[in-house]
Image (cartoon, helix red, strand yellow):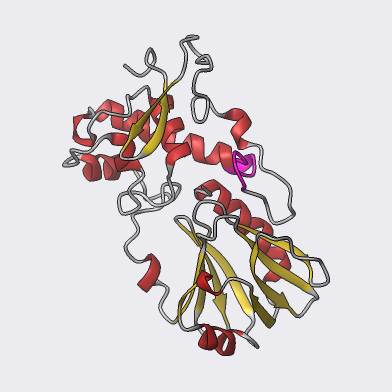
Amino acid sequence: MPELPEVETIKNELAPHIIGRGISGVSLIFEGIIRQPSVEEFHSRLIGQKITGVARRGKYLILDLTSGEALIIHLKMTGSLLVKPTSAEADRFIRAILYLDNEIGIYFRDPRKLGRMWLVEDKNSIVGKLGPEPLEADFSHQILAQRLSKRTAPIKAVLCDQSLVAGIGNMYADEALFGARIHPLRTGKSLSPEEVEHLHSAIQQVLWSAINNKGASVDSYLRPSGEVGTAHFQFQVAHRGGQSCPVCGTPIQRISIRNRGSYFCPQCQQ
């Protein structure tokens, strides 16, 4: 699933191609991708607008428009946004195309048809309940400690709760917990102040490293150019079940936590 580093990479690499461009047409191959408004309204309200900015909030991509509205995109598990000439042939997994006035298109590729788009006047109606951004300066270890202090769920599940911290999912929760040497089944409130500090640092280190490596292409994620990200080559435990821990050599284990596959080292994360 595209998480914060993947969506941040898409934002950064889309921006030079689309900011200031007008939307000249829309093709909805799979109309179920639109959650709000109706398909008819989506067409009529979007065509003719210019894209004035591109932002990310958690795992959501936000395109600001001249009308003051926002086009919000969530890639869900298998989505990617590709930049191609409008003359390019769409493969069988393309679900929607936004045609721009510079003869390029934003191609929404999504093998599992789980991605969604919203066209809204108030972006907070979609992203307003998200927790703080983990890479912002005001996200301190004290803030993290406060948010964990009453949580009785396993820390792996807590980190994936988007109302606690925005943008962290399965892969980077596993990596951050390994970096902090915390077992994924520990409860949120059981962490000591020192462990919370270590976790806070690990979260930021893991996310920045993944952004620098253009995201992780462990499944279907592609950058706007169609190239893959390389962050997964740096993974210590995520998606490495049965392989040796890079620190101690113990086989990495995979368990299910709240229906999510979770990877950890049983020796380093006791």
Q: Main secondary structure of the magenta part?
A: loop
Give 158 or 210, whichever is nearer the viewer.
Answer: 158
Total numbered labels: 0
Q: For residue 217: magenta?
A: yes
Q: Which residues are magenta?
A: 211-220
Q: Is residue 261 left or right of residue 26?
A: left
Q: Is residue 191 above or below residue 22?
A: above
Give 200 or 23, whichever is nearer the viewer.
Answer: 23
Residue occupying image coordinates x 55% and y 75%: 31
Residue occupying image coordinates x 49% and y 25%: 237
Q: Indicate the quadrant containing the C terminus: top left, top right, bottom left or bottom right.
A: top left
Residue occupying image coordinates x 71% and y 76%: 99
**Residue 220, image x, y percentages:** 62, 47
Q: Is residue 13 left or right of residue 261?
A: right
**Residue 207, image x, y percentages:** 51, 40
Q: Is residue 88 above or below residue 132?
A: below
Q: For residue 29: magenta?
A: no
Give 133 or 3, whichever is nearer the viewer.
Answer: 3
**Residue 27, image x, y percentages:** 66, 77
